[in-house]
């Protein structure tokens, strides 16, 4: 076979792999019209697409149901694994990772494996050190496109523990503190950065505990908090990641760390989490709840997404009183409505020039 023919074959093979990867990455969102989507994206015929679909069904990557126009495709489960560990003094997350978890993840790119190593060891160690439970359950589910992992313990529950230790009014306020980062109930052994960074490494990251659930999804503007239909025992962490992604642990760390010492100096505060039972954010006490521990950071971005209005006292406490007392901090805000922006501007106008120069924001119309 000549070199020209080999190049043609390699090009065709590469394009075919691209088509099949696109199918696997998009079939969950388009189970019934995936053929149409692929044909449009690659500008190939439906007949060509169906050859790729048939190949993926034959090799066990996809399942198909229905006939002709009603045909639907789904990712096929490739592997499932679970194990329950007794919490005891000899239990160590690095040993469990190398002996049990890593082999079950199969052949994945190095950057993906590093994300899984970070996520698993952080969450498993949290359960060992903080849960006060007796068991940890680990479960892995794999398809050709994604991997999911569950780490669950039968302990006191992460949100309730934080609420109790910090004397917070509501479990939702524990989620607000977790969202800021640098939160730990055991500062002698933990920096409080594990959950913050881990949640941002995965495509989806959920915590179910007590009466509420927290969900962070990469690419979505909101972090979701939901009330559980029934109070959940212990803490369950669910992580999901595409088997092929350009994301790396370094890229995530670099978004929030700075300086020669790689200091975790930047945080984003989802202001909407400070609301309790739908009450508007009007008081200085509510502002102080938002401001709790933010002086641990150099740069604070107050995200007002989901907040339609605030009170004058609330704005004044953050953008004049606190800003004046912390002139070396950079206070920014994003996703503010016109009404919210006006009150922030009013608070800043009565602060010192050094505060005004550091407090900037992007407005949401």
Image: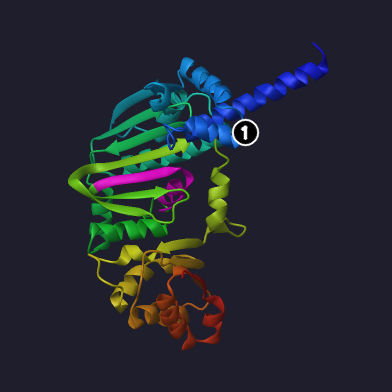
Residue at left offset 66%, top offset 26%? 14
Q: Secondary structure at mark 1?
A: loop
The residue pinned by badge 1 equals 43
Which quadrant of the view contains residue 173?
bottom left
Location of residue 201 in the rendering, given as x and y in whole percent from the top left corner: 48, 45
Location of residue 359 in the rendering, given as x and y in whole percent from the top left corner: 52, 76
Residue at left offset 32%, top offset 50%? 214
Is residue 197 part of the magenta span, yes or no?
yes
Location of residue 10 in the rendering, given as x and y in whole percent from the top left corner: 71, 21
Residue closer to the observer: 324 or 200: 200
Residue closer to the observer: 269 or 24: 24
Residue at left offset 28%, top offset 72%? 280
Residue at left offset 53%, top offset 57%? 256
Is residue 22 part of the magenta span, yes or no?
no
Residue 130 visible in rendering: no
Residue 7 visible in rendering: yes
Q: Residues within 10 Å of mark 1 (few under 14, many from 20)?
A: few
Relative vertical location of residue 17 with respect to residue 41 in this rendering, above or below: above
Classify residue 187 as left or right of residue 113: left
Relative vertical location of residue 287 with respect to residue 169 in this rendering, above or below: below
* Bounds of the magenta segment: 192-209
Residue closer to the observer: 178 or 71: 71
Location of residue 321 in the rendering, given as x and y in whole percent from the top left corner: 41, 82
């Amino acid at each position: 076979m000549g070199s020209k023919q080999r190049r043609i074959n390699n090009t065709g093979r590469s394009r075919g792999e691209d088509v099949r990867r696109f199918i696997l990455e998009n079939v969950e969102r388009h189970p019934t019209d995936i053929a149409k989507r692929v044909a449009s994206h690659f500008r190939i015929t439906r007949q060509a697409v169906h050859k790729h679909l048939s190949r993926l069904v034959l090799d066990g990557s996809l399942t198909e149901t229905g006939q002709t126009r009603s045909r639907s495709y789904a990712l096929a489960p490739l592997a499932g694994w679970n194990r329950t560990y007794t919490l005891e003094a000899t239990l160590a997350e690095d040993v469990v990772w190398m002996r049990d978890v890593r082999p079950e993840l199969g052949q994945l790119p190095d950057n993906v494996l590093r994300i899984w190593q970070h996520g698993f060891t952080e969450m498993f160690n949290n359960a060992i050190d903080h849960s006060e439970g007796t068991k940890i359950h680990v479960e892995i589910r794999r398809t050709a496109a994604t991997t999911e992992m569950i780490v669950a313990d039968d302990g006191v529950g992460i949100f309730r523990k934080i609420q109790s230790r910090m004397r917070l009014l509501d479990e939702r306020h524990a989620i607000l503190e977790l969202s800021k980062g640098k939160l730990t109930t055991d500062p002698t052994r933990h920096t409080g950065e594990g959950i913050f960074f881990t949640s941002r490494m995965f495509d989806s990251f959920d915590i179910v505990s007590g009466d509420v659930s927290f969900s962070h999804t990469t690419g979505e503007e909101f972090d979701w908090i939901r009330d559980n239909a029934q109070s959940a025992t212990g803490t369950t962490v669910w992580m999901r990641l595409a088997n092929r992604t350009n994301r790396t642990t370094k890229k995530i760390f670099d978004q929030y760390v700075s300086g020669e010492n790689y200091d975790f100096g930047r945080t984003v505060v989802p202001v909407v989490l400070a609301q309790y039972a739908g009450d508007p954010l009007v008081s200085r006490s509510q502002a102080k709840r938002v401001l709790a521990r933010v002086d641990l950071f150099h740069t604070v971005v107050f995200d007002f997404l989901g907040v339609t209005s605030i009170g004058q006292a609330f704005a004044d406490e953050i953008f004049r009183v606190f800003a004046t007392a912390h002139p070396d901090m950079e206070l920014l805000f994003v996703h503010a409505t016109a009404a919210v922006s006006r009150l922030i501007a009013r608070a800043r106008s009565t602060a010192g020039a050094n505060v005004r120069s550091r407090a900037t924001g992007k407005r949401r119309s």
